[in-house]
Image (cartoon, rainbow, N blue to C red):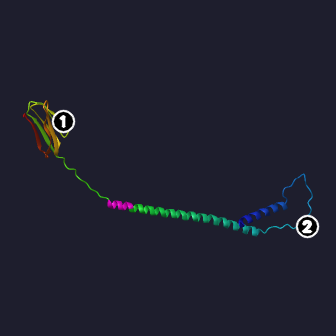
């Protein structure tokens, strides 16, 4: 409020200076001005007081500017502190993850295979179903099926014109072993 009052006073003084030292003249309306008498003294403001008031205004503006900078600086410092905390927590999390990291390797087992051999010594064409897959064998022929997985397998034998001659049976095949299914006349 003091600043507004000071600016208002300076403005009014400036206007009074302009009015007392001539102001705006109209050439057509020139009237004789009465001489200045000792009763009508014009007060001239003190130059030092105006200068002091201007210094006060400048100091007030600087205080406002510096207060604004101080608050912004404190806000930035707080944000930097928060970011440092976050980075620190991330580093701790990463180090924990690195500490719990387990490296392991394994060698898959070598798949051992076996062979299934079908020997049809009958005079009839036959079909043998091994683990759901059908193999056709002509009369008096032998078929060898290599690279079969080891372990249990099922098979069933059907003869053309006779139907099922061997119901589904489960057997076991060992590594590098040959299992023979014999089909002979009955």
Q: Describe residue 179's horizontal placement relative to residue 47 as left or right.
A: left
* Residue depicted at 79% across the width and 63% down the height: 12
Mark 1–mark 2 Cα distance, whole angstroms, equals 139 Å
Q: Which residue is mark 1?
A: 134
Q: Quadrant of the N terminus?
A: bottom right
Residue 139 percent across, percent down from the top left: 10, 31
Instruction: Tell which of 110 and 50 is nearer to you.
Output: 110
Q: Is residue 97 magenta?
A: yes
**SS at badge 2:** loop
Q: Which residues are magenta?
A: 93-100
Sequence order check: which comes first, mark 1 or mark 2?
2
* Residue depicted at 84% across the width and 60% down the height: 19
* Residue depicted at 38% across the width and 60% down the height: 94
Q: Is residue 78 magenta?
A: no
Instruction: Tell which of 36 and 72 is nearer to you.
Output: 72
Check residue 37 in the rendering and tell me which mark sits there, or answer none. Answer: 2
Instruction: Tell which of 139 and 46 is nearer to you.
Output: 139
């Amino acid at each position: 409020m003091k600043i507004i009052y000071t600016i208002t006073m300076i403005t009014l003084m400036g206007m009074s200076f302009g009015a007392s030292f001539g102001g705006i003249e109209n050439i057509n309306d020139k009237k004789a001005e009465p001489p200045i008498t000792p009763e009508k003294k014009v007060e001239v403001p003190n130059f030092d007081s105006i200068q002091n008031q201007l210094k006060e205004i400048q100091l007030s503006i600087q205080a406002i500017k510096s207060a604004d900078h101080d608050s912004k600086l404190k806000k930035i410092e707080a944000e930097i502190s928060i970011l440092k905390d976050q980075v620190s927590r991330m580093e701790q999390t990463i180090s924990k993850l690195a500490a719990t990291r387990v490296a392991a390797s394994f060698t898959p087992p070598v798949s051992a295979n076996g062979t299934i051999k079908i020997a049809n010594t009958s005079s009839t064409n036959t079909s043998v179903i091994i683990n759901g897959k059908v193999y056709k064998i002509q009369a008096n022929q032998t078929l060898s099926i290599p690279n079969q997985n080891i372990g249990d397998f099922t098979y069933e034998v059907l003869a053309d014109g006779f139907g099922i001659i061997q119901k589904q049976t489960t057997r076991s095949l060992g590594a590098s072993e040959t299992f023979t299914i014999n089909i002979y006349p009955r």
